[in-house]
Image (cartoon, grey):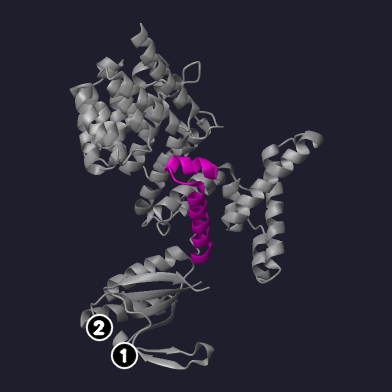
Amino acid sequence: MRYLVSVIDDGAGRATSDEATAIDAFNDRLQADGHWVFAGGLGSTENATTIDNREGRGLVTDGPFVETKEWLAGFWIIEAADLDEVLALATEGSKACNRKVEVRPFL
Amino acid sequence: MLAALTRRFGDLDVAEEATAEAFAVAVERWPDDGVPPNPGAWLTTTATRRAIDRIRRESRRDEKHQEAEMLRDDDPPEPIGAVEDDRLRLLFTCCHPALALEARLALTLRMVGGLTVPEIARAFLVPETTIGQRITRAKGKIRATRIPYRVPSAADLPARVSGVLAVLYLVFNEGYLASGPGTDPIREDLTAEAIRLARLVHGLLPDDGEATGLLALLLLTEARRPSRLSPDGGLVPLAEQDRGRWDAALIDEGHRLVRARLATGEPPGPYQVLAAINAVHTSATDVAATDWSQIVALYDQLVRLDPSPVVALNRAVAIAELDGPAVALALVDRLGDRLDAYPALHAARADLLRRLDRAAEAREAWDRAIALTGNPAEAAALARRRDGLSAARGA
């Protein structure tokens, strides 16, 4: 089963070099143990562009879809047998990136 | 049966509905066909067939392979112990930390304890629709996020146990003071189930202080059950119980567990303190011989561990024995806002007011407690005490 592990940033900014090292080590382990599907860090919401082409409106707006105090800073897509397995991995991931993470299953 | 079906089909809804259907078929057929030689096996077989039928119907749309997976029964015939293991697995699934605490309680009472939604609603003092939604949502999350159906690994076990203990304590309490108007006032099925599961958890984690504490607490409470109902079905308060009818074997076992925890010298958690309070009560030959200063000291310790208003109420009741009803009443009145819907608060107030010769106010408080309780034996006992009050005044 696949799970999205979202990394939540509440103002800490980019990862420090210590955090980056810990994230790399965690990623290596995910790959070695067969849990890795994909992962990535995201640029800041400052550089987000929002598109709304519902009903062909073609609206392009500078900025994120909603202004919040917490936003998505990156994510892992993890293959795991069940929730217990992914929660254990997410607990390590949260420690490695030094951020809160949220776990959700893919449909 | 529910636990075994859940393990086989990996889905609480399928297992629950199939079990209910099997009972419905039994009600329909047994009166005409006669009760089968082994009713339990008959029910399990019927429920399993119903569950397979349902999965066949539902899987026709998409997951054909899942159907094949579930229909294949590779399991060897179950030894007796496997049934207990199933219940424990179901318990850990229902008490998973990814579920909100209220959802864990409701789900366990429904799935492991077998309580109805109205009974659970009364136990929590919330509307039935709220409980129904909690259960539905919890089942949905178990399915969608694939919460596993198994006892956690050794590393995760201690953290997962506290959630299980909280739930077992609530199941026991519901049995010890059942809330349904149509049910027996004391439901031995629930108290026995809670004790059985507490023994299982204690057996699994013999060094866990709180698992030991909870088992001791349940045993020492259960030991008093034979003297808790009067012949007319009213609840008998602790002070008036015939202590000769208490179960000496259960008391002995509970005391041994409490002493074993004291001997470790580790700081106790709430269940161990509650067990110690009950050990003091069950050591006294009568209410006057009770070491109330010891009980109040233990309640002081408990309030620091668990600052809930219900604990504060019980502490106030113990204070009445030590410092008198006026001091206790002041403490109880301070809890009135938070526990207004809790019958025990009004019953405690009534008793303190009676002791202070404030009969009219006592009667009012008893009326309020009677109106709030869902337990007929408790209502009968409260009415008896209220009426005893007017008889005493008339005399």
**Viewer-side label of 1, 2:** 1
Q: Secondary structure at mark 1?
A: helix
Q: Numbered disc 1: what chain?
A: A
What range of the chain is rendered magenta? B116-145
Residue A47: which disc? 1
Answer with left or right where residue A31 lies relative to residue B328: right
Residue B97: quarter of image? bottom left
Residue located beneath label 2 in the image: A14
Label 1, residues with CA under 10 Å away: few <14, some 14-19, many ≥20: few
Which quadrant does the C terminus of chain B fall into? top left
Q: Amino acid at mark 1?
A: Asn
Q: Numbered disc 2: what chain?
A: A
For the point 20% across and 35% down, the residue is: B300
Which quadrant does the N terminus of chain B fall into? top right
| Nearer to us in this view, B275 or A101 | A101
Look at the image and tell me whether residue B14 can be seen: yes
Look at the image and tell me whether residue B252 can be seen: no
For the point 58% across and 53% down, the residue is: B6
Q: Amino acid at mark 2?
A: Arg
Does the magenta stretch mainly form a helix, a strand or a loop? helix
Q: Position of residue B3 (x, y in %)?
A: 56, 48
